[in-house]
Image: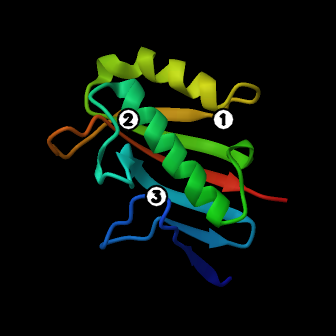
Amino acid sequence: MPRQVISTPDAPEYPTYSQAVKVDNTIYVAGTTGVDVATGEFAGPTIQDQARQALRNCQAILRAAGAELSDVVMVHTLLMRPEDADNLTEVFNEFFPDVRPPRCVSKIGVDRPGLLVSIAMGAVTS
């Protein structure tokens, strides 16, 4: 099956990998951080600030691929501080109010100053 690289200027771009890849009706969104593309900086100092921005960035990538957050079927969240998991749930409830996709949470393995969260997800469109 052919793969389509998804790219949008509305989310952070990384020189070493694609923002997402679409294969048939499945979209794989790369780990996306809470960087505000307007400033190039993290959206704020809290897990809530960065998680909201990371999810907005994922949403922009999904839209570029013809999908929405309602099409998400799996989320993998990487946290710098595992104790932030409860605050992360608060933010996920804002973005996924009805059907909450399955998700897993792991600890970030790289130490980047200021980075609190990275979110990857998969979505399926009809």
Tell which residue pokes out farthest to the right in this image.
126
Secondary structure at badge 2 equals helix
Disc with the residue nearer the chain's start (2 vs 3):
3
Secondary structure at badge 1 equals loop
Residue assigned mark 3: 11
Residue assigned mark 2: 50
Residue depicted at x 51% and y 20%: 89
Quarter of the image where one finds residue 80: top left
Residue depicted at x 42% and y 51%: 32
Give neighbour class at mark 1: few <14, some 14-19, many 20+ (Cα, 10 Å). Answer: some
- How far across and how far down the image is residue 19, in percent? 47, 65
In the displayed structure, does residue 30 sit left or right of residue 69?
Answer: left
Residue 121 visible in this rendered orientation of the protein: no
The span from disc 2 to disc 3 (Cα, nearest Å) is: 13 Å
Residue depicted at x 31% and y 25%: 46
Q: Does residue 41 lie above or below 103 as drawn? A: below
Give neighbour class at mark 3: few <14, some 14-19, many 20+ (Cα, 10 Å). Answer: many
| Foreground label between 2 and 1 | 2
Residue assigned mark 1: 101
- Mark on residue 118? none
Tell me, yes or no, whether the two marked residues, 2 and 3, touch with CB atoms within 8 Å. Answer: no
The span from disc 1 to disc 3 (Cα, nearest Å) is: 22 Å
| Visual colour scheme | rainbow
Disc with the residue nearer the chain's start (2 vs 1):
2
Tell which residue pokes out farthest to the front in this image.
38
